[in-house]
Structures are given as C-alpha cells and as structure tokens.
Amino acid sequence: MATTASDNISNLKSAVAGLNQISENERNGFVNLVSRYLSGEAQHVEWSKIQTPTDEVVVPYHSLAPTPDGSSEVKDLLDKLVVLKLNGGLGTTMGCTGPKSVIEVRDGLTFLDLIVIQIENLNNKYGSNVPLLLMNSFNTHDDTQKIVEKYTNSNVEIHTFNQSQYPRLVAEDFLPLPSKGQTGKDGWYPPGHGDVFPSLLNSGKLDALLSKGKEYVFVANSDNLGAIVDLKILNHLIQNNNEYCMEVTPKTLADVKGGTLISYEGRVQLLEIAQVQDEHVNEFKSIEKFKIFNTNNLWVNLKAVKRLVEADALKMEIIPNPKEVDGVKVLQLETAAGAAIRFFDKAIGINVPRSRFLPVKATSDLLLVQSDLYTLQDGFVTRNSARANPENPSIELGPEFKKVSNFLTRFKSIPSIIELDSLKVAGDVWFGAGVTIKGKVSIIAKSGEKLEIPDGAVIANKEINGPEDL
C-alpha cells in the first residue's frame, strides 16, 4: 500500500523529534514547511486576475520627497533603522573558503569592511545609532564571530544571529538525512532567506530592537555593493506607514533572475516567471510594467514582522531545491524573503536606479568593481561619471579566472575599461600592467598556448587569438 502524505508527516515528526542538534522552534518550523509542501498548497496565479501595478504601488524613485534638511531630523529617521545583511553564503563559487562577505572587493577591503565603514560614517555624521545585524547560517557562523571582533572599536553596534538549520530530506521516503546516520554538516541546510523573519523573532533580536525604538529593518544581500542606506526611501515609508517595501529596478538583457511585482486581488505580489502559465509567457515578457525585477533590497516594519510571525501568517511559496549527498537524492525546501510582500499591509515597490543593484556573484563582477569604472569613497562604490554608456559592459571570463586567487594572479593590474562594451576571455591568458580595453574585445588563447597581453597595451574592437593579433 502506498504511503500517504499524512503517513509521511507522522513518520517525519517522530524522526525529527530525535534530532537534538536543533531547537524546538527549528523542529516545528521544519515539520510545518514539509507539511505545507506535501499538502500541495501550490500558489496558482490566475492570469486574468493579474494587474499591472500603478505608480502608487510601484513608486518611481524620482517622485519620492527630498530628505529632510536638518541633521536632527535625519538623526530621528536613522534612529528608527536597523541594517540587516544576509550573510549565510560561502564564497565557494569564487573558489574561496569561509563567508562570502570576507572576499576582498577593492583596495584590500572586504564586503563586510565596506558595510561597516558606510554605517559608521552615517553614525558619525548624524550622531545616530544604526546597528548592523548579520544573519549567518551554520556554515558561516563560527568564522563570522571571529571576523567581527576586528570591528569592536568602530562606531557600529554589530549583532549576529543564526538562521534556522533544517535537515535535508531523503527524496525517497521524506525522512531527515541526519536520522539515517549522516551526522556531519552535509545532513543539514539553511532554508533560504525567507527564514529571516522567524529567525529574527526566535533569536530574541526582534524584541530587543523593538524595545530600543527601532521601527524598520533594511534587509539586503551582503554581496550587493549598491545596497546602501537611502534616507529618501526610509522617510517615504515612515510618512506613509508602509509595512514592506521591495526595491525593484528595470531589467536589462543580463537579468534573467528575479521576479516582478504585480497587483493581485488587492495586494502587491511577487511573480516569478515560473508561476506564469506557458501560454502567457510571451505576453508577460512583452508588458513594459513587468520589465522590472526584485533586487532583494527590502525595507520591512519590525512590528509587522512580529505580528505576522507570531500569527504564523507568512506562508511564502516553497522552492524545492533537489541535491545529492553521497549518492543519496535529497530535497531542500526553501523560501524567499521577497515572496512575503503579499502578507504585509500597505506594501509597495520602489523603482530605484540601477546603481542600487551591484551584486558581485563572480570574478567578472569583481573585475568591474575593481576597475576604473568605479571609485571608492567612504565605503561607497560609485560609478565613474567619465563613462558615457549608462549600462555596464558585459564581461565573460573563462574557467581559468573563476577562482579569486587565479583571477588576481592573471591580472598584473586591473585594465582600464571605461570605454568597454563587451569582453570575452578564454584560455591561458595573462594581462600585463596598465592595459586599456575598449569597444568589443575577444581574447581567446589557442588550446595549450599561453597568451600574454603586454604592459600598456591598448586593445580596441579586436579579436585576439595569439601574439600575432596584438
């Protein structure tokens, strides 16, 4: 006889009860998530009910009121704010061990250094006390605890807390992998950044912040260099009592990920392309108002978070993420923080400039931010005004450049790319110092050959396959 969903759940409950490595909150949260998944409560979106959002729902950034002039008014605004960086990711995709936030971005400074410098400058300038919260995962917690010690003398209060630790599910029978003898880290996973809301409450951080008069949290990925505190946005939310705000920005050809905002049954909702029925996909892609995407810069009212988490009302779409551990097929069930928008009252999007979305996901992004295309001042990475084209060049680096250590050794110095449109590099290529690249350039070394770009070379609109092309 086939096992039913309820059999699965009761077997799961008994198995999870024996997992004493995690807290009761985590055990309950996990069983809850799996039950929702097994009940098949998929969130179907009816195409006919989708409405394009108005400017009241997705507010154009340029229409926001200017920030108050007086520094005491600014201090009042900032004293209501907490900055929270999602710090659960490892730098493995870029060949680094430890938390991704400790990769050096520019001038010897890491993501975390820049974040601390930015907030410290705000606190120094206005006499405010904006604290920094880091949400770690069990993968990054120990390292981060050591790293933040170096900031003890900075003018920023730093708090860390861990997001939930859930057991991976064995796909075959829906039992937790750790209860089958997989006792190491591979038996567990952090369940996505949608978990930020319950983890804030369960860690005790939420109540502590509320007791200090904090009202809003600005949540962003630690690798998004554009996610800096914006007083105009904060002021707008406070004036209009918005419980939730998602920063969206216009899509470019490079943006495949990130849902868009729709109006649906009187609420604002995040819509991922996967939720659109096949026959409507082309129409969906052609609608101008939908050509925006979620930057994952989120501003959320703390009292609203407390109310909704305590009522167990945040039932975001579940993202099943299949993996394999030692030949065993497992499932990770995850949720995303952006999908929570539809549960908050007076939720809005703000259509922000592209400069607020500058993620570093690969060494090709590192090349951009380390080059003369950007300048660094007071912890802020800013686009060089000397570049005429509003869009960044597209950069494709081969696998030889994938790890940060290899990337750094292959460039004697980062080339000038202010006038670059696109760059493709593949094979055993090495760059000298003071190189300038302009227009459309492709540098592809022949298999088994080393290709060195000499110091001071200027390469414009060229395809290079060997030294003879230089």
Image (tube, grey):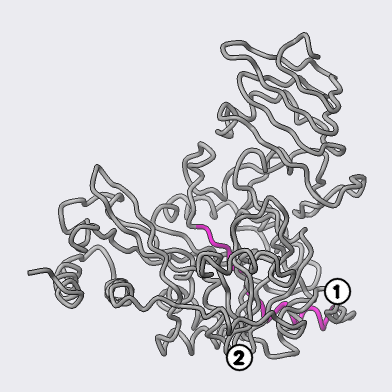
Q: Is residue 84 magenta?
A: yes
Residue toward you, 261 or 286: 286
Q: Which residue was labeled with disc 2?
A: 266
Q: Is residue 142 above or below residue 45?
A: above
Q: Is residue 192 above or below residue 233?
A: above
Please name the residue shown 57% across and 11% down the image: 448
Tag shown at residue 378: none
Look at label 1 and name its amino acid: His
Residue toward you, 243 or 255: 255
Q: Is residue 341 above or below residue 327?
A: below
Query: In the structure shown, which secondary structural element does the residue marked by tag 2 occupy?
Result: loop
Q: Is residue 450 above or below residue 265?
A: above
In the image, 341: left or right of 115?
left
In the image, 274: left or right of 243?
left
Residue toward you, 41 or 183: 41
Residue toward you, 376 or 268: 268
Q: Is residue 214 visible?
A: no
